[in-house]
Each structure stands twice: as structure tokens, then as C-alpha cells.
Image (spheres, helix red, strand yellow):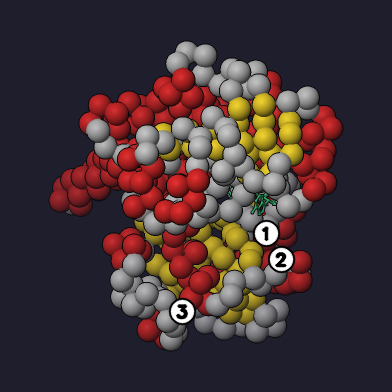
């Protein structure tokens, strides 16, 4: 580690992001109040990373490391703050004793990702003593984590001695959530005979397509700029059709499994699917898009509820949960979805508000316990 770690150093970095980088934000992240944000710089390897710990009320902050060529430092900060806040909600809703954290490494994974840089990153993770536990995300793989793990024990989802890639677990959780939403919207037949559009057929999307085909989905439209990935699926599964775009296609379910922020005031106008459920993180461009979907009668399963399968797997690795326990917890994502959708309908609120209430209740209960323990001292 060649340079000092700067903690919550918003003031030291000038930026033009809304109102300030971390503390004085005026956008939707203003209320997020992250516990700790760590800027990491290793001169020898050129590593520039940011680790954000949003909330450790429920346990150590766990979340993946995204490696991406951000257009600016401010953009990287915004991404890591949003993603780590989402992890707090995801683990809370999934019943995991984990807090929310995430990290970003700034740079194109194709060029910056050297073993030396990954080890330098691991030393920064290690310096946090387990307050932050890392895993894979876009731009990083289980193989990369094996290298990070040479410098720290606070790594999950690695191949060597770990549970490996979490793509299948995430896909299975999304599938359970989607089935629950389809039953609510279409009746007991659920997904059978329906058309689902899957946007992005990478580690999660491709597995989701296979699960949907096995569940009797009539047609599965897939869109992905990676033509090899879509062609492989279409060649192997009779129900799959490759299209240019699915968000505006005539489908019963739209499943965003590529990038976040695809649900915008504009795109929601084009949406023809009555159900939206997918793996992508931070699907809404802004919170008010949930209201727009609600007003249009679109049933949206909040991303952090649907895509928790991965964190259930890697959190299970951290705590030594059995395979059966992990599977049961992933399947429970379907029940949680059912409850949230029912509450939203009964109270006439958005699914987003209903899911946030589940998260808040869990955090509040734990805070009360911690408060009681403190006052008993
Ligand atoms: N892997 C996990 O366990 C996990 C867990 C939770 C959330 N997620 C989220 O799910 C999403 C997918 O994750 P992944 O691990 O499958 O990533 P991945 O990188 O393996 O796959 C993403 C796929 O999306 C495609 N893509 C990129 N831009 C696209 C576009 N505009 N339209 C359609 N396709 C596009 C890419 O070509 C790629 O095939 C990400 O948003 C990720 O953050 C993943």
C-alpha cells in the first residue's frame, strides 16, 4: 500500500456532482448518510478505488467490486454510493445479517486488471479489518477474487475455497420473484404460456432464460449487444428469439438483466409489459419512476428484492451456511416478493414503498436491540 487511505474525504476532492461528493449532496443520495467512504490509491500499480460502507447495523458491509472506466471521479463516487446503499436494502430484505457496502475500481477492466493491482486492492480491503467484505460485480470475476484473496481474507464468491460465481443464485432468486409477481398479476398459471423479455444474457440473464424455458414460458425474447451470447441461447432453447430491444416489446414481463437506470420517465412510457422484474441493480433512474409505473398499473418488483440471490450465496459462504440453508433463503425471495406486492396493493402504495418499509422495519428492530444493549452497559 503506497499511500494513505483517506476516509470520508469529500472535501479533499473537488467535484461538480450535486452539491458535493459525499457529505453535502443535494440529490437523492443526500439522505443516505454513508458511514464511511474510503479512497484508495496505490502509486505502484495505478490502482484508484473507492470503498463505500453505507450501513453496518445488521452486520459487516458486504458487496461486490465493480471495475469500470468511469467518465469522471464524481461519477464513480455516485455509483459506489448508490450501489452500497442498495446492498443495505438487499441484505435487510433477504433476512441476511449483513450491512451494505460496495467498491469501485476506476478503469477499463480489460487493461487495469493486473494481478499486482488486484493484490494492492486486497490490501486496502484488508485494512478495514472485516468492516467491508468484497465479492464480484461487473468487471470482476471469481478468478480475480482468488488474487484479491492473496492479500485479504475478507473476500467471498472466490473460486479457491469459496462458493464461486453467484450468477446462478441471482438468476434463481429473480426467477422466484418473477414467478410470484406473475401469479399476482396473471393468476395461478403464473409464467406458463407468457412472453418474457430478457435484456442482457450474461452470467445472470442466460441462466434466467434457461429457468424460464424450463418453467413453461411460451416465448422468451432476448436482447444483448453480444451476438455470440444470444446466438448460443437461441441455438440451444426452442423458445428463445433474439430481438434488438425488449423494453418496448410486446411482452408480459420485462426483465432488465444488463445495466441499471433503464427505467426512466421516458422509457416507462414505452413499456408494454405489465410486470417488471430483473437482476440489474438500481433499475430506476430516479425514485419517482416507481410512482409513474404504479400510476400506469405496472407491477415492479424492486431490484434489491429480486436480485438478492447472489448476496444470500456469498453471505452464506461468510457465515458457513449449508447449501440447503442457502437454497431455502433464495427460494424465500419469492415469498418476500409476494408479501411486498400484497402489502402494496392492500395499502395502495408503490411496491417500492412497501419494500422500503420491510427494510426500515428490520433496521429499526436491530437499532432498538443495539440501543437496549448500550443502555444496559
Ligand atoms: N452476478 C450477480 O450475482 C448479480 C447479483 C445482483 C445483481 N446483478 C446485476 O445484474 C446485472 C447483470 O449481471 P451479470 O453478472 O449477468 O453481468 P454480465 O456482465 O455477466 O452480463 C451483462 C450482460 O448485459 C449485456 N448488455 C450490456 N449492455 C446491454 C444493453 N444495453 N442491452 C442489453 N444487454 C446489454 C452484456 O453484453 C452482458 O452480456 C448487472 O446489473 C449486475 O449488477 C448481478
Q: CA distance from mark 1 to mark 3?
A: 24 Å
Q: Position of residue 69 (x, y in %)?
A: 64, 70
Residue in the picture at 31% in, 66% down: 30
* View extreme (top): residue: 188
Q: Position of residue 142 (x, y in %)?
A: 70, 50
Residue 164 seen in the figure: no
How many labels were placed on the picture? 3
Dot 3, crowdedness within 10 Å: few (<14), some or many (≥20)? Answer: some
Q: Are marks 3 and 2 in contact (CB under 8 Å)?
A: no
Residue in the picture at 49% in, 64% down: 80
Q: Nearer the viewer, mark 1 or mark 3?
A: 1
> In this image, 333 relative to 106: left or right?
left
Q: Is mark 1 within 8 Å of ligand 1?
A: yes
Dot 2, crowdedness within 10 Å: few (<14), some or many (≥20)? Answer: some
Q: Please tell me the numbered disc located at residue 187.
A: none
Q: Position of residue 293 (x, y in %)?
A: 39, 42
> In this image, 251 relative to 34: left or right?
right
* View extreme (left): residue: 375
Residue ID for mark 3: 6
Q: CA distance from mark 3 to mark 2?
A: 24 Å
Residue ID for mark 1: 139
Residue 372 seen in the figure: yes
Question: Under tag 3, what secondary structure?
Answer: strand
State whether residue 94 is above or below residue 45: above
Picture quarter containing residue 164?
A: top right
> In this image, 266 relative to 375: left or right?
right
Residue ID for mark 2: 109
Amino acid at each position: 500500500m503506497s499511500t494513505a487511505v483517506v476516509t470520508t474525504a469529500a472535501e479533499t476532492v473537488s467535484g461538480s456532482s450535486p452539491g458535493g461528493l459525499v457529505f453535502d449532496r443535494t440529490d437523492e443520495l443526500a439522505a443516505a448518510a454513508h458511514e464511511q467512504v474510503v479512497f484508495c490509491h496505490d502509486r505502484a500499480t495505478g490502482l484508484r478505488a473507492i470503498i463505500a460502507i453505507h450501513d453496518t447495523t445488521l452486520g459487516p458491509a458486504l458487496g461486490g467490486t465493480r471495475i469500470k472506466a468511469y467518465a469522471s471521479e464524481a461519477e464513480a463516487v455516485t455509483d459506489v454510493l448508490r450501489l452500497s446503499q442498495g446492498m443495505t436494502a438487499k441484505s435487510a430484505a433477504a433476512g441476511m445479517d449483513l450491512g451494505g457496502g460496495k467498491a469501485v475500481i476506476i478503469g477499463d477492466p480489460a487493461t487495469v486488471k493486473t494481478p499486482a493491482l488486484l493484490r494492492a486492492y486486497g490490501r486496502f480491503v484488508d485494512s478495514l479489518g472485516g468492516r467491508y467484505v468484497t465479492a464480484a460485480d461487473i468487471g470482476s470475476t471469481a478468478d480475480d477474487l482468488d488474487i484479491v484473496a492473496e492479500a485479504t481474507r475478507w473476500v467471498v464468491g472466490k473460486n479457491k475455497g469459496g462458493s464461486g460465481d453467484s450468477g446462478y443464485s441471482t438468476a434463481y432468486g429473480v426467477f422466484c420473484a418473477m414467478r410470484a409477481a406473475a401469479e399476482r398479476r396473471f393468476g395461478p398459471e403464473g409464467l406458463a404460456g407468457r412472453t418474457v423479455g430478457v435484456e442482457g444474457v450474461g452470467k445472470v440473464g442466460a441462466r434466467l432464460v434457461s429457468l424460464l424455458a424450463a418453467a413453461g414460458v411460451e416465448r422468451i425474447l432476448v436482447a444483448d449487444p453480444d451476438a455470440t451470447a444470444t446466438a448460443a441461447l437461441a441455438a440451444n432453447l426452442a423458445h428463445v428469439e433474439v430481438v434488438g430491444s425488449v423494453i418496448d416489446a410486446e411482452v408480459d414481463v420485462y426483465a432488465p438483466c444488463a445495466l441499471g437506470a433503464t427505467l426512466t420517465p421516458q422509457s416507462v412510457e414505452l413499456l408494454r409489459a405489465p410486470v417488471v422484474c430483473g437482476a440489474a441493480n438500481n433499475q430506476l433512474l430516479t425514485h419517482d419512476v416507481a410512482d409513474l409505473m404504479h400510476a400506469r398499473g405496472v407491477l415492479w418488483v424492486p431490484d434489491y428484492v429480486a436480485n438478492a440471490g447472489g448476496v444470500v450465496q456469498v453471505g452464506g459462504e461468510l457465515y458457513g451456511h449449508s447449501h440447503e440453508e442457502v437454497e431455502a433463503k433464495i427460494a424465500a425471495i419469492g415469498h418476500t416478493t409476494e408479501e411486498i406486492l400484497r402489502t402494496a396493493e392492500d395499502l395502495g402504495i408503490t411496491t417500492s414503498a412497501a419494500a422500503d418499509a420491510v427494510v426500515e422495519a428490520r433496521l429499526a428492530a436491530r437499532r432498538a436491540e443495539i440501543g437496549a444493549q448500550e443502555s444496559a452497559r
